[in-house]
Image (tube, coloured by chain):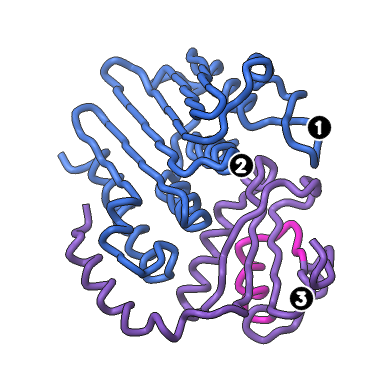
Amino acid sequence: MKSLQELRELRAELEKEISARNGEGKPKIIIGMGTCGIAAGARDILQAVSQEVRKRNLDVITTQTGCIGMCEQEPLIDIQLPGQDRITYGRVTAKDVERIVVEHVVNGHVVEELAIARLEEGGI
Amino acid sequence: MRELSLHILDIAQNSIAALASVIEIRIDENPVQDRLTIQITDNGKGIPEQQLAQATDPFFTSRTTRRVGLGLALLARAAEEAQGGLGIRSKVGTGTKVTATFCHSHIDRAPIGDLAGTMLAIIMLNPTTEVVYHHTYLEKTFCIDTRQIKYELGEIAINHPAVVSWLEEALREGIDDLYGGD
């Protein structure tokens, strides 16, 4: 197994920047992880999201939700920028992920042609 | 589901929905004895006895967003197709143990698939849940426990992108060593 020493060194390195990473108001990326989502490829979508986040060194919260009843549209990802409506993207492919991350998460523009639902801010 | 690792990810979601604080995933592979066992144990809220008998019925679910529950039913089917079976033991307030057995060499046994991806998904998306992954292949064992990793990390979050990278490499190397090496 990879050495824990490496992990300790990583910790020391990350502790230097931790103060900058704290605080509210981060963009949220939410992935549908119900049986339907997983069967449709949600794990690969999560991997693509994770790679984009690492590649661009983004400070976001990546989280999950269960089945929301739109099984036929899976894999689903939702993007919620602080203070803005939550947008659901459906039938997302790994290729779409880069576009959604760059256009929506980084630049703040909803990718209209992939979006399938909008949930007003404050609503659940 | 094309891969057993996807079933594992799916069953672990049940544990998370059951508010488990610890999920233990044990995989025991023995091609010599021609068996494969996957066991997922959690300390979640458990399944009431009257629901246990229905747990693998696709037309039963405790959820409210749809009227079917496929996770356990799909895993039961995958196990039965490979001359194995599925067992569920659960106690309300204590937790649930799901055990799937397979004939390792059976032609209809689904491939295990990307276990590292599955473990990463569970750990990354549920940073407050403790995950133990214990995998035995013949006499070799690979084990990872998020409690040990968190101890080493101190205040640093386990789903910090840099930590996720470390975890991914640790998982991939560990699993490769299990199958390869000699």
Identified at 61% across, 52% down, the residue is A42
Q: Position of residue B162 (x, y in %)?
A: 37, 71
SS type, badge 3: loop
Same chain check for tags 3 and 1: no
Q: Position of residue B1 (x, y in %)?
A: 60, 36
Q: Which chain letter matches label 3?
A: A
Q: Position of residue B77 (x, y in %)?
A: 60, 21
Q: Nearer the viewer, residue B92 or A97?
A: B92
Which segment did they paint magenta?
A: A88-103
Q: Where is mark 3, residue-wise? A: A111
Same chain check for tags 2 and 1: yes
| Local crowd size for mark 2, using a 10 Å CA cut-off: few (<14), some (14–19), many (≥20) | some
Residue type for callout 2? Ala
- Of all chains in the rendering, the one displayed in blue is B
CA gap between label 3 and label 1 equals 32 Å
Identified at 32% across, 84% down, the residue is A16
Residue type for callout 1? Arg
Identified at 25% across, 76% down, the residue is A12
Position of residue B67 in the picture relative to residue B88 (left or right): right
The nearer-to-camera label among 3 and 2 is: 2
Q: Where is mark 2, residue-wise? A: B17
